[in-house]
Each structure stands twice: as C-alpha cells, then as structure tokens.
C-alpha cells in the first residue's frame, strides 16, 4: 500500500519520541509537529489508495508525499545521530538502544561517529543493514572486523585518521562501495600512511575514490597495482610506498582509468625514483596530480598533454595550459630559477605552493594573470625572493601578488612550517 512508507517512519519515530525527546529542551513542539504531519500523510494515503485507479493525478501526489516521508526519515536519522553524540550513556549506549528499538531505527542509512572515543568496532553497527554511509574518522580504532561484509548497502567507508592499517577480505563483499577512505597524515616526507589493500580489490567495481593504498607489502609483485587497473570508475586514487620497479605496472593500470580526476603517487622513501614515462598519455579528465618522490625529470607526457615547457632552470606554463587546474605545488626543484606564466594559462588556479625551490629569486613572472588565485604559499624559499615582496621596495614584486587574498611565508622549524602572512 502507498501508506506503508509512512507506517515505517512511524515505527521509527514512536520509540524515538518516547525515549529521547524528553532529554532535550526546546524541541518538543517541533517533534509534535512532525508527528501531526505523519498523521496527515497517513490519512491522505489511505484515501489515495481507494481513489488512485479513478484519478491518475493522485499518482503524482502519492509520489510527492512518499518522497517527503523519506526526507523526513533522513532528518530523523540525522537528529538521532546528533543525539547519540551527546547522550549521557555515550555512543555505545546509543548504538545499543538503536539495536533494541526494532526495525524502524535499523533503517538508518547514515552513521557519523567522527571524533568519538571508540577503541573497538561496535558490534551493533553491522546490524544496520541499510547503512549507506559510515564515518569512523578520528576514532581510536585499530581493526575492522570480518562482519563489515554484512553491510551490503554501504557506499562510503571513512576511516581517515584512525589506526587501522589493514582491511579484512570481507570488504570485497561490499559491491556498492564507492568511497573507501583510509589514511593518516604526519609531518615528514612519508607524511601520509595508507592501508594494505586486500588481494582482489579490483572486484569493487563501483569504487570512485580509493585513498590510500600501500603497494609494497608481502612481495605481491605488482598484483595490487594491476587490480587498480580494473577499477574503471575511479575518479580519485592515492597510491603510496611506490618503488621504481612498480612504475611500469602502475602506468599500465592508469591508462585504463578514463574517469580519473585526481592522482597522488608517493615513493617508499625520499630518494626513491618515480618514473612515469611509461604512461603514453594521462587520463583526459585529470585535474590534480601529486608526484612525491625523486623525479629525474618530468614525465614526457606532461609537456605534450598540457602544453608545458620545462628545461631544468626555467618552467613555462604556456597560453591555454591546464584549463581546469585548481591546485599546483612546485616542490624541491633544485635547478629551477625562473617560472613564467603566460596569459590564459591555468585560469581556474586557486592555490599555488612554491616549496624549497632555493634558486628562485623572483616571484613567477606573469603570476598577475592568475586572477582567480586565492592562496600563495612560499615555503622554504630564498631570502632574496621573500625580500622582494616588501611593499615599500621600489622595483620589487609586491605588485605581482597584491591581488592574492592570502600569501603565506614559511620557515621549517621544529618539524613543521612556521608561517607568517604578507601584510
């Protein structure tokens, strides 16, 4: 019957009303209003069921009411989650209550436990069989149980900034999974740590974001990198702990990822060479590219694909280059002296970082063409370059950056960048 969706929501709503609303002040009237709306929906749908065959217009109204009921259910889900974060019995008490309240609350589709003090994966979570989005970010979790495979409807699993380093093979049962996010950030070269990808990860054919997998575990001989090539829906991927011998297999996989927008690759250590010359051309939709490691030279396909000229001492972004690029970082280019930006290059660039390019003594020529630039970071750059940004210096470079809202200058100190801002 058309009214069944409202009855499902009433089953969700009634125990919530009885057990939880009394804990909060100032929401009683709003909750009563929702209950009244449920009653109106139910009454309407009862009549609509009887008349739908004689009046086709009712089908449209029934659809609208059903969608409104679903939206109301989503609001209740979010409200319950907010309540759970602040409940006197804590998150585990809240989850236990959800498990006891019957089918209504087990219809939850979103569970956000970010920043809670969880040290173990709650058993109650895997009973939420309709769950689509699960965030355990910034918790104290170290392991994920095999029972994660029960969440067959899961689309997003966010485990960023946890202590989890490996996922069970049962993760491969989650065929609807689109976003798998698991990494931790530190303040050193290998500042991003990921997870050991299970063999067969290529079977997760719906994946769009995969961040971040570590490839050199257990001498897998490139198996995981080959599996990445099967994930043809990927839009964003981060691959860590690369060795030079991995690069050909990686390039072979990247050529199959036609939808890729963002790619981050990082070497196993600072002096490990990353060679991406085997890639004949990058994915055409690529917008963001990070290569972290030792580059003997820029990959050959970068100049040909993006109209970029680089000859060691000078880097030129030619007119029409990088039309969709929003973030650019030039780091530790030891021979780089000049950077030139031609008009109509990188028109959408919002963030530019220059990091430890010690021979550069001037701000990039033509930076004034980057009219959408919002942030310029100058980290570990030469004293001469920084001194030329003094607004009182005649013939200096301040005029080149005066249109940029945020210009920061950084000095490496105590394992971090100590920043000041250009005034």
Image (cartoon, rainbow, N blue to C red):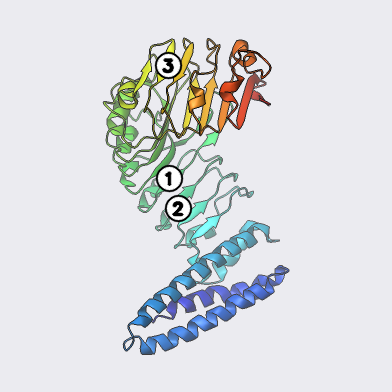
Residue designated by label 2: 148
Residue designated by label 1: 168
The label shown at residue 315 is 3
Instruction: Tell me the quarter of the image containing the N terminus.
Output: bottom left
Left or right: 207 with respect to 413?
A: left
Q: How far across and how far down the image is residue 270, in percent?
A: 48, 18
Mark-to-mark CA distance, 1 and 3:
45 Å
Mark-to-mark CA distance, 3 and 2:
49 Å
Viewer-proximal residue among 50 and 200: 50
Instruction: Confirm or deny contact between disc 2 and disc 1 (CB under 8 A).
Output: yes
- Lower position in the chain sequence, tag 3 or tag 2: 2
Q: How far across and how far down the image is residue 28, in percent?
A: 68, 74
Q: How far across and how far down the image is residue 146, in percent?
A: 44, 50
Residue 22 drawn above or below residue 297? below
Dot 3 alpha-carbon crowd within 10 angstroms: few under 14, some 14 to 19, many 20 or more: some
Q: Is residue 298 visible?
A: no
What secondary structure is marked by label 3?
strand
């Amino acid at each position: 019957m058309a009214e069944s969706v409202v009855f499902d929501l009433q089953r969700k709503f009634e125990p919530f009303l009885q057990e939880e609303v009394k804990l909060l002040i100032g929401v009683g009237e709003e909750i009563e209003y929702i209950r009244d709306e449920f009653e109106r929906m139910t009454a309407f749908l009862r009549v609509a069921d009887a008349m739908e065959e004689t009046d086709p217009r009712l089908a449209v109204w029934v659809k609208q009411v059903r969608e409104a009921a679903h939206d109301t259910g989503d609001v209740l889900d979010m409200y319950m989650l907010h309540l759970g974060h602040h409940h006197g019995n804590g998150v585990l008490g809240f989850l236990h209550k959800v498990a006891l309240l019957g089918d209504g609350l087990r219809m939850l589709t979103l569970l956000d436990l970010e920043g809670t003090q969880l040290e173990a994966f709650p058993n109650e979570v895997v009973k939420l069989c309709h769950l689509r989005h699960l965030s355990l970010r910034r918790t104290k979790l170290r392991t994920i149980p095999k029972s994660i495979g029960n969440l067959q409807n899961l689309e997003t699993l966010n485990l960023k900034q946890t202590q989890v380093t490996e996922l069970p093979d049962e993760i491969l049962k989650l065929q609807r999974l689109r976003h798998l996010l698991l990494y931790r950030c530190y303040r050193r070269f290998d500042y991003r740590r990921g997870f050991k990808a299970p063999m067969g990860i290529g079977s997760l054919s719906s994946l769009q974001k995969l961040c971040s997998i570590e490839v050199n575990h257990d001498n897998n001989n490139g198996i995981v990198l080959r599996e990445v090539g099967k994930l043809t829906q990927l839009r964003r991927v981060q691959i860590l702990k690369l060795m030079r011998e991995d690069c050909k297999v990686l390039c072979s996989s990247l050529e199959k990822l036609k939808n890729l927008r963002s790619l981050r690759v990082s070497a196993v250590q600072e002096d490990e060479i990353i060679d991406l010359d085997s890639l004949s051309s990058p994915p055409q939709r690529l917008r963001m590219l990070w290569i972290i490691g030792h580059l003997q030279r820029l990959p050959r396909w970068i100049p040909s694909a993006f109209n970029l000229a680089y000859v060691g001492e000078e880097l030129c972004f030619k007119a029409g280059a990088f039309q969709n690029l929003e973030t650019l970082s030039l780091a530790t280019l030891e021979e780089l002296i000049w950077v030139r930006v031609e008009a109509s290059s990188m028109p959408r660039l919002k963030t530019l970082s220059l990091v430890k390019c010690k021979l550069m003594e001037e701000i990039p020529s033509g930076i004034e063409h980057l009219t959408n630039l919002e942030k310029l970071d100058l980290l570990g750059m030469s004293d001469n370059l920084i001194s030329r940004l003094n607004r009182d210096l005649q013939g200096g470079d301040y005029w080149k950056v005066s249109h940029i809202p945020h210009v920061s200058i950084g000095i490496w100190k105590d394992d971090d960048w100590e920043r000041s801002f250009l005034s």
